[in-house]
Structures are given as structure tokens and as C-alpha cells.
Image (cartoon, rainbow, N blue to C red):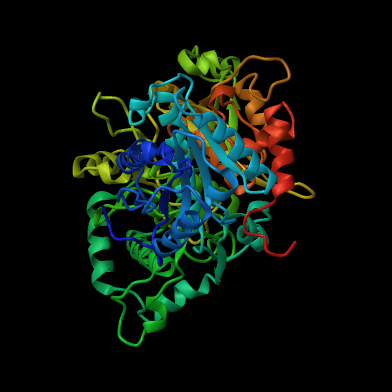
Amino acid sequence: MAKNRYIGEYPVIGIRPTIDGRRGPLKVRESLEEQTMSMAQAAKALFEQNICYSNGEPVKVVIADTTIGRVAEAAACAAKFKKENVDITLTVTPCWCYGAETMDMDPMTIKGVWGFNGTERPGAVYLASVLATHAQKGLPAFGIYGHEVQNLDEVTDIPEDVKEKLLRFGRAAVAVATMRGKSYLQIGSMCMGIGGSIIDQEFIQDYLGMRVESVDEVEIIRRMTEGIYDEAEFQKALAWTKEHCKEGWDKNPDFVKASPEKKAEAWEFTVKMYCIIKDLMNGNPNLPEGCEEEMVGHNAIAGGFQGQRQWTDFYPNCDYPEALLNSSFDYSGAREPYILATENDVLNGLGMLFMKLLTNRAQIFADVRTFWSPEATKRATGYELTGVAKENGGFIHLINSGAACLDACGECLDGQGKPVMKKWWEVTAEDIEKMTAATDWPSADYGYFRGGGFSSHYITRAEMPATMIRLNLVKGLGPVLQIAEGWTVSLPDEVTEKLMRRTDYTWPCTWFAPRCDGVEGSPFRSAYDVMNNWGANHGAISYGHVGADLITLCSMLRIPVCMHNVPNQDIFRPAAWNAFGMDKEGQDYRACAAYGPMYRNIR
């Protein structure tokens, strides 16, 4: 667990135990008190044991002071939840309740309802009734109902299918609510004509509840020139960098190669950039006296750095700060990853943010660069593809100069000895040694970066589950998300060497095979079709298959998913989506259009 990096408290989940309000001589309500509260306690324990904030702290869960049988108790619960910073509510019940009286009416909370599947009392009837009322009132809620009938004394034995939905709802809701009120910090502006770096403040405000902060890149030079950084921190970071970040190959011709002295200056410059960008994002109380304004930072949960070309034609590039900030460690040891998008591609940075908040793991920023078919691979290298690359019709080369986290080298192992990108608080000192040993830092390619600098270089030599996504803005439609689950591919070193020599060998390299279905006309027919249907030049990549969680998160944000390979049975959206047609993709588009972004207050 670490200190909360952001201003404001983390979101809280509130449990609302609703109950049949009828009293009288047969004591209907009284007979249900224990079971109802037991359900609430079971849900609380499940959330607390399985969901964490981005700093590693278990999610905070509160329960209403009493069961909720009538509107007065619903109001008392709402008053308590307001004081407790509750942004997410889960209503639970084993029985019939008065739906319109007991439901959560706050338009800003993210809502779920768990109705117990039992025969003694009609919990399922209440669930259906209150979900219909939610739809009627325009307050979407997720419905959770177990597949198998349980006995009334089993309310605390949460079935696996119910656990899966509860946790998917909880993870996505905590991620969504964590973004509220935070900032995206763009350092610079548009980069080399890339549409993703044309920032759309209205989208970020209306859909994510965030603000945009803008800082000119010259602010970094000002802080360097005027000494507005923590000198002790800089010296510690520089010493660590000299020990752990070994220089790699210099591909530049002799007439432009930098001297050892110039390279040493570039290292100092880029390490100082790292410290200053971190200060810009979240502040630093240890800046020199007289720099109180700079101490506070921008409360940025994500950011981007323009770089090319105005900066990189003149100054060392930002590859070192981008790569290390996005990693799960630095000179201080393991720490929560930052999100810093290269080329200020805000849409890719936000995709990285979604997955970081869902997984608490470092993220990869990469060009979706080249599709390699089995035939082309054999022609170029003599190698016959095997495994997931062969099964899915080839693989895609993910490579970019900057913001791929060092965790993606695949050198860390889980408890079963399998390669993994760990949750940041699970990263050990040994893991850090492995990741830094697997990475070298070649001199920047002067064809791209005339100001010099260093780019991280490693090869992902492991097969790991991975999810690649892209957030796009489409005129007349709005935001859409693409999702491709698959695996990183481990190729023999000699094959990687031949393929990498055809592109830029000085950058980090990950081979990726999306999971494909072979269906004619499908965007997932083969890896080629995924590449051919991808919506932009960049992708955000996370460890694990997290597509189902992303679909749930997007429904909360009202962002339709335009392309995915998640099994239908794993798609979990608010119950009201079922009223928008029978096909799940069409439902999603129509529901998102009807409800509109959660934070739009001018319609």
C-alpha cells in the first residue's frame, strides 16, 4: 500500500440491503433481517478481499445502518453514503421489496442490484421489478442473479457466477469513479499530425468526468534553468540510472554520433526531465523555497508528452521518462505506475488508464506497426510459425520509441513459474533487477530525434495473455473502443533478430497474436484482419485478458464497443441494454446514444 497520489478520496462502494417492509403480527420484515444483512456482509467481504485501489489499498465498503424497507430508510442510507464519499452502490436482497421506494435514485452513482435466487422469498421478482423501474426512470443498473437456486440459509455462500459479476461490476465501477475529478495533463500539444493528440476537452469532461490541464513543453526548460526541481531526488535518480540503465547500440553514422561527454549530458537532461514531469503531474512538496506554486502539481491521473518534432529536433527525447514513468518501479523501488502517452496521443493514454485502473499493472504504449503472416515470416527468416502465432494466422509487431513499460520484457515470474507482468505492489527487488538487466538504452536515432537522447530496447521473450485496445473518436458518432484479446509471442532469438533488423532495432519489441475465430468477414478472422480493422496507428496493451471488464467499464461511461473478441457469455452491461434490441452490439450503440455521457450537464 502507498499514499494516495491524487487529491481527493478514493471512491467508496455502498451496500444497500433492501427488505420487505411489511411488519405486523407475522413479522415478515423481522424474519428477513438476518438474511438480508448477511448478504450485505458477504458482498462487502468479497469486494474488500478482491478489489484494490491503484495505490494497493483494499477498496472501502460501507453498509447502510439499517435494512431499507421504505423510502425514509432509503433517504437515511443516501444521507450516510453522501458523507462517506460513496460513488458506487450495490443493492442486495433475498426477498420482495418495494422497488420504487427502496431503489437508489442518485443519478450520479454507479448502480448494481443483486437478487438472491431462492424459492422461499421472491428475490428474483424484486430484482426484475426494480430493474424495470431503473429503466423506466433512466437510471441504468446492473442486474446480478445466480444461475442455480439456493436455500435461504445459503445467502452468504456466493456462487461463482455471482462472484464473477459482482467483481466485474466492482472493478469497473471503482475504475470509472477513480477518474472523476482528476486531470489529463498534456505537455505540449499536437504531434506530427496525429489525430489522437488533438485533445477533445468536451469528450474528456462529458464522458470521463475529468478536466484537461495544458503545459507548454518550455515549462520543463524553465524548471531546469531556474532549478525548480528536487536536487536530492535528481541525484538519487541519476545514480540509480547510471547503475541500472546500461547504454545500448548507437546506430548513428560517425559524423552525427554524440561524444561520451554529450551522452553524459543527455543522461542528466533526461533524468531531470523524469523528475520534472513527475512533479508536473502530482506535485512535490520538496521543491526549493519560493516554488510553492509549482509544488502543487496538476492532480493528473494520466498525461502525454508531445515531443516530436519541436522538442526532439532540439532537445534529447522523452523516451527514458516515458518508459520509466509507465513502469512499476524507479530509483525508489516498486511504485504505482504513471500513465504518460508518447506523442501526447491522449486517446491511447486514456486506454492505458482504463486498463491500469482495472488491473493495477503497468501498461504498454506501442505502434501497431506490422502484420507478419506465416508465409511472410518463413520467407524472411526461414522459420515456420508454431503455437498461438500459427493458430491465429500470424502476429502483429508492437513497437514504439517511448512509452512501453519495462515490465513487458516478460522476465518476471508468478508463483507457478510463468511469465507475468505483476501488480505493482507485488514487484520485488529481484524483479526490478531482472527487468533492468533485460533492457538496454541505445542512443536515439538521429533520423527521428536530432536532439539525441536514449530509447529503451528489450524483446518480450515470453508468451503471456494480453489485451490490446484503442479508443477512437468518430465524427457524428463519438467515442468507440476496440478490444483484441490474445497473447504475446515468443520467437526464437535468431528470428527476432532478422525481423527487427528490418525496422528500428533501438526500440522495445513485442510480438502479439490476437485470438481469432477464422470466420469469413469477421474482424477477427485472422491477425491480418485485426490489423486491417484497427482504428489508429497506436494501441494500448495490458497483461491479461481483461476485455470483459473493459466492456462493462465502457457501458458505465456510455462508450460503445465497436470491435471485440470477448465471448458473448462474458458480456455484462446494465439490464436496460436488453430493451434496445436482441443483438448485443446494436444494443450497446443504441443504449449509449440514448443515455448519453454520464457527466454531460448541458444537453
Q: State left or right for residue 76 relative to residue 107.
A: left
Residue 102 vertical position relative to residue 378 in the rendered view, above or below: below
Give the residue drawn at x 47%, y 50%. 88
Q: State left or right for residue 268 relative to residue 112.
A: left
Is there any visible trace of residue 485 in the rendered image? yes
Is there any visible trace of residue 364 in the rendered image? no
Identify the residue at the far right of this view.
476
* Quadrant into which the C terminus falls: bottom right
Give the residue drawn at x 43%, y 66%. 281
Residue 386 vertical position relative to residue 95 in the rendered view, above or below: above
Across and down, in percent, residue 551 comes to: 57, 36
558 and 232: which is toward the camera: 558
Give the residue drawn at x 27%, y 73%. 231
Residue 323 vertical position relative to residue 297 in the rendered view, above or below: above
Image-quadrant location for residue 426: top left
Across and down, in percent, residue 562 comes to: 68, 35
502 and 207: which is toward the camera: 207
Image-quadrant location for residue 369: top right
207 and 471: which is toward the camera: 207
Identify the residue at the far left of this view.
430
Across and down, in percent, residue 354 comes to: 50, 46
